Amino acid sequence: MNCDFRTDFPIFSKYPEMVYLDNAATTQKPRQVNEAVTRFYEEANANPLRGVYDLSVKATEAYESAREKVANLIGAKDASEIIFTRNTTEALNLIAYSYGLSHLHEGDEIVITIMEHHSNILPWQMVARQTGAKLVYMMIDKEGRISPEEIETKITDRTKIVSIGYVSNVMGVLNPVEAVIKKAHSVGAIAIVDGAQSTPHMKVDVTELDCDFYALSGHKMLAPMGIGALYGKMKLLLEMPPFLTGGEMIEYVEQQSATFAEVPHKFEAGTVNAGGAVGLGAAIDYINSIGLDYIEKREAELVKYMIERMGELPYIEIIGGSKPCDHHGIVTFMVKDVHPHDVASILDEQHVCIRAGHHCAQPLLKFLGVNATDRASVYFYNTEEEIDRFIDALTKVRGYLGYGA
Ligand code: 7TS
């Protein structure tokens, strides 16, 4: 297996002893992305979309070219349907504040699943509180699956919004988003996909999916923190009011009123994160140079190996599906008798980075009957050797705390 691209990631040379298995939280950044950001600030820095002078035009071109790259990556037909946001959280809040508050009324229903990240729960709680709409949950089985009956019975004529994560950040399960989108449309509801955990790892085509909105975070796919994107169907974006107001999102401003800029700029108030967008564009170029087919296949191999090796340790319980293909890059687990935070601390002493806690999915953890878990998550740059180091570290946990094997 050729792992040459690991040398593209300066952090791995800086900490050669580190095993980084918290990729679902954020990924490491390749030199190519860091250099693209630096190049933008050294060679094209000016406030984009404002100046008529050459440097500002350069900055605008760099920013808009990144928008094209996001559109191409996720199969949006028109780059104007891509709005830059800070992250998935801001993208979902944009839909909630703009579409949700202006379209929902008392008696309407918003349908999500019990395994959503808090950023796909709290915006809908807010909309429900302010409009009198009801928040309804599709439940899952122990393996994290949503049954066809659950989709059929929870999405009804009262449903106006359905919002679902493509891949769960805790279970790693790939959700049946196509069926959910179809059902949502059949009752006249809009369908939103939280793509935070899918976009970095698999081919996504929003046109084929026919979702109305799709949210992603750059930092989970090699890009800098502070840049994300929202795809929305143009006909919805045109009718939606702005989320934030102020500079750069207007056409004309009078003393008491204003008209707004065209989509997407209507939704990008204030000075934009052009450097971040350029970094996201470079991250997309990098991902394309490796290929999402390869990335998906490689991560499946790594997860299969990780689950096999974890199977050698009888005191480990993996949460969710029993098959490796149920865990898209993410393996959440418990070590018998040991608090997940202790596990993560003991692993940290051995330079292995994993996440412990509720993973911003408290309703899911309550449903699973646990307060916290451990989670190891891979990206294409991880290796079998690192997984061996992770397993070696895990074998020491119970001994450190005085438990037998
Ligand atoms: N949706 C899902 C499915 C996520 O996994 C996350 C972040 C978000 C939304 C929010 O993304 P953000 O970029 O706006 O923060 N998930 C995690 C995680 O699992 N550990 O840290 C962040």
Image: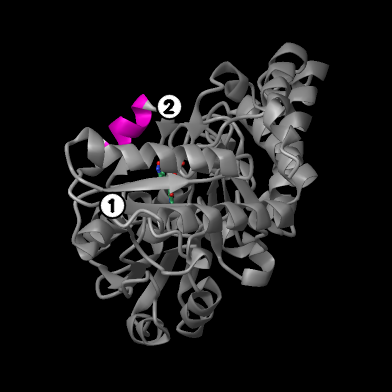
Vertical position of residue 189 compared to residue 128: above or below = below
Give the structural element (helix, strand or loop) at label 1: strand
Give the main secondary structure, helix, strand or loop, of the magenta stretch. Answer: helix
User: Which element carries disc 2, helix, strand or loop?
Assistant: loop
Disc 2 crowd rating (10 Å Cα; few below 14, some 14-19, many 20+) is some
At label 2, which amino acid type do we have?
A: His
Q: Which residues are magenta?
A: 343-349
Say which residue appears at 18% left-offset and 61% top-offset.
369
Q: Position of residue 148 (x, y in %)?
A: 42, 85
Q: Is residue 248 left or right of residue 58?
A: left
What residue is rendered at 43% in x and 36% in y? 256
Q: Quadrant of the N terminus?
A: top right
Q: Is residue 399 magenta?
A: no
Residue 64 visible from this viewpoint: no
User: From the viewer's perspective, is 20 left or right of 29?
Assistant: left
Left or right placement of residue 280 versus residue 91 in this view: right
- How many badges with numbers are in the image? 2
Task: Provide residue 254's location: percent of width, then percent of height.
Answer: 51, 34
**Front one among 308 and 164:** 308
Classify 199 as above or below 166: above
Residue of label 2: 351
Identify the residue at the far front of this view: 404
In this orientation, which residue lies closer to the viewer: 152 or 358? Answer: 358
Whether residue 40 is visible here, answered yes or no, is: yes
Marked residue nearer the N-terminal end (2 or 1): 1
Tag 1: amino acid: Met
**Residues tagged 2 and 1 counted as in contact (Cβ below 8 A):** no
State the separation of the CA atoms marked 2 and 1: 19 Å
**Which x, y percent locates residue 274?**
64, 28
333 relative to 285, above or below = below
Mark identifier at residue 334 = 1
